[in-house]
Amino acid sequence: MTTIANNTIRDSPFGMVARVFLGAFLSITDEATDLVVISNYYKDLVAQANALLIMVSLSMFCQFFVAMGTYAR
């Protein structure tokens, strides 16, 4: 019964929309919290804020290039 339910959720359009929405929501929330932390760091810890900003930027660019490479095939 569990296998049938999992396959139904996986194959249904609603299940796909729910997974895409949840993934996008979590990604945007993560990015928003990163920006809040970076802005708070700039008040007192400028060097650490710059380091965190560089790490987040590099991570985003790496993810972008991996995604582009994946979908280019």
Image (spheres, rainbow, N blue to C red):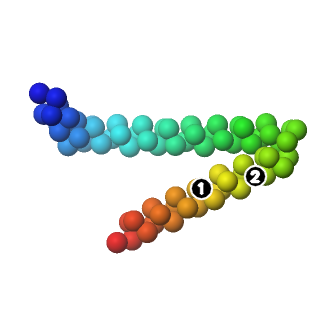
Instruction: Specify the amino acid type for callout 1.
Output: Ser
Q: Quadrant of the C terminus?
A: bottom left
Q: Residue at x 52, y 43 (%)?
A: 27
Residue that carries the numbered disc 2 in the rendered image: 51
Q: Would you call the spot at circle 1 few (<14 residues within 10 Å), some (14-19), or many (20 or more)?
A: few
- x and y percentages locating residue 64 in the rendered image: 52, 61
Where is 7 relative to 60, above or below?
Answer: above
- x and y percentages locating residue 32 in the rendered image: 63, 39
Q: Residue furthest bottom?
A: 73
Q: Residue furthest top?
A: 1
Sequence-first tag of 2 and 1: 2
User: How far apart are the alpha carbons under marks 2 and 1?
Assistant: 12 Å
Q: Quadrant of the N terminus?
A: top left
User: Closer to the camera, 60 or 55?
Assistant: 55
17 vs 58, left or right, is: left
- x and y percentages locating residue 66 in the rendered image: 47, 63
Q: Secondary structure at mark 2?
A: helix
Instruction: Specify the amino acid type for callout 2.
Output: Ala
User: Residue 6 is drawn in which quadrant?
Assistant: top left
Q: Residue furthest right?
A: 44
Where is 69 relative to 57, above or below?
Answer: below
Q: Residue at x 74, y 42 (%)?
A: 38
User: Residue 41 is drawn in which quadrant?
Assistant: top right
Residue that carries the numbered disc 1 in the rendered image: 59
Q: Residue at x 65, y 51 (%)?
A: 56
Q: Would you call the spot at circle 2 few (<14 residues within 10 Å), some (14-19), or many (20 or more)?
A: few
Q: Residue at x 41, y 39 (%)?
A: 21
- x and y percentages locating residue 16 in the rendered image: 30, 42
